[in-house]
Amino acid sequence: MAPILGRGIFGKVVCEFYDQKGGKWDKVEVSTGLTSDAVFKVTPPGSDKDDAQRQADARAAAIKASAGGGIVVIEGEPDAIPGGACVLSGLRQGVDGTYRIKTVTHSLSREGFITSLHIENPDVPQETTEAAT
């Protein structure tokens, strides 16, 4: 498990747009909620302020979603679904928390029924699948 991956962490997203009324280039800035001084610049620029805001918000959400994650293997859980939440507890500080389930793989063998969860985006509250050590 990696609560925060070291690559591609941006603290802010910036998207430029041309302000027709002001006759100049302007920009919108959105925080990703991650601790970093790095700034992600969205290209191409937005067509107007609203478009630039939508692009910046979407990119910030995508950056936060890919900030941390890993793979968790639990006893078979047929209710685990992509987009649901997986709560990790009892691992260590900084890793324990709620993650979004990206993919689910179920396996059945002589050893039993297991579910593998590829999880990402720490601290996303949604439907819950418990996983503890």
Image (tube, rainbow, N blue to C red):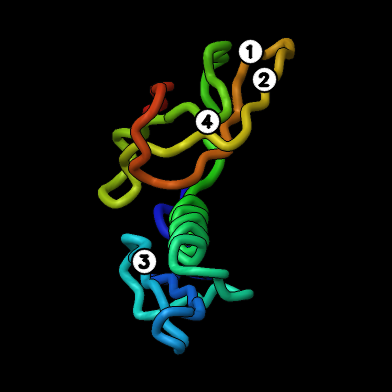
Q: CA distance from mark 4 to mark 1?
A: 21 Å
- For the point 58% across and 11% down, which residue is it? 78
Image x and y of residue 48, in percent:
50, 69
Judging by the rendered image, the residue that carries numbered circle 3 is 30
Q: CA distance from mark 4 to mark 2?
A: 16 Å
Q: Which part of the image, by quadrant, shows the C terminus?
A: top left
Q: In this rendering, does residue 67 appear at all?
A: no
Nearer mark to the viewer, of 3 and 4: 3
Count neighbours of disc 4 (C-alpha within 10 A) and say few if under 14, some if 14 to 19, many if 20 or more: some
Mark 4 or 1, nearer chain start: 4
Question: Quick one: SS at disc 3?
Answer: strand
Q: In the displayed image of the protein, which residue is found farthest to the left? A: 93
Q: Residues at badges 3 and 4 in contact (C-beta under 8 Å)?
A: no
The three-letter code of the residue at mark 4 reads Gly
The three-letter code of the residue at mark 1 reads Phe
Q: In this rendering, does residue 117 appear at all?
A: yes
Judging by the rendered image, the residue that carries numbered circle 2 is 106
Count neighbours of disc 1 (C-alpha within 10 A) and say few if under 14, some if 14 to 19, many if 20 or more: some
